[in-house]
Amino acid sequence: MSEQAEEHQAEVTTYTAEQFTALKAENESMKAKMNELLGETKQAKARAKQEAEERAALANEKAKKDGDFEQLYKSSSEQALQYKEQLESLANSVSNEKRNAEAMKLAMQLADGYNAELLAEKIALRLKNTDEGIKVLDSNGQLTVSTVEDLKAEFSANERFASLLKGNQSSGGGAAGGKSGGAAGNVMQRAEFDKMVPFKKMEFMKAGGKISD
């Protein structure tokens, strides 16, 4: 009996007003950042969120009047977890939105209509939104020093996507490509192309080079 009482006493944690205030300040900071992201992505779920916060505020106010800082700390901890999850979800949503927008922008320079949509899906796989902006990935998903213009040149020279590119649909005859007849000479493997520095890539593309997967 005494052992159970000791175990129960060991489980009880006392939270102070200072701990609650510190956690509340952290929650407010995350809440402000989340509201900023909500505005950026135009996902206005403010009403339901506000009602939930008002209910939590009433419960917290009652606990505060009763001096129940343990309950206040528990409530704020749960709220902190919700904010962190929502913040992460919104951050991912914003990042994907920026990446997809850049992919579509690039695709529309290379193709029209539905072809641009198809091409944008492929381009998006080679882009990543970072703190420094949109970066280009290689075929293995690793960051490279290539620019978006380098990636555009790569896609425009890749025979896999030739049928989607502007001009190729109406070039008649049959073979993809439209520049010098069936020259198979200036072809490079993608892995080798990815290792090249950007200006060498541009030189290769301008010389009519093709990329083979």
Image (spheres, rainbow, N blue to C red):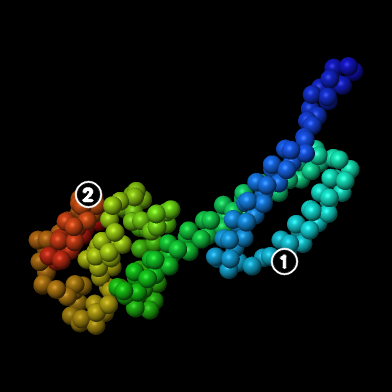
Q: Residues within 10 Å of mark 2 (few under 14, many from 20)?
A: some
Q: SS of the residue at dot 2? A: loop
Query: Residue 177, relative to residue 93: is it above or below?
Result: below
Of the two numbered discs 1 and 2 on the same chain, state the one appearing first in sequence: 1
Question: Residue shown at 24%/65% (left/top)?
Answer: 153
Disc tally is: 2
In the drawing, does residue 158 fall left or right of residue 106? Answer: left
Question: Residue shown at 77%/35% (left/top)?
Answer: 16
The residue beneath circle 2 is 195
- Identity, as a three-letter code, of the amino acid under mark 1: Arg
Query: Residue 134, relative to residue 112: is it above or below?
Result: above
Q: SS of the residue at dot 1? A: helix
Give the distance between the C-alpha atoms of the residues marked 1 and 2, in whole angstroms.
Answer: 51 Å
In the drawing, does residue 161 fall left or right of residue 124? Answer: left
Q: Position of residue 60 (x, y in %)?
A: 81, 49
Question: Residue shown at 55%/65% (left/top)?
Answer: 41
Q: Which mark is residue 23?
A: none
Q: Position of residue 68 (x, y in %)?
A: 85, 40
For residue 190, which quarter of the picture? bottom left
The residue beneath circle 1 is 47
- Identity, as a three-letter code, of the amino acid under mark 2: Lys
In the drawing, does residue 86 fall left or right of residue 133? Answer: right
Question: Residue shown at 27%/77% (left/top)?
Answer: 166
* Image quarter hosting the N terminus: top right
In the drawing, does residue 37 fall left or right of residue 171? Answer: right
Q: Position of residue 22 (x, y in %)?
A: 69, 42
Residue 67 visible: yes
Residue 125 visible: no
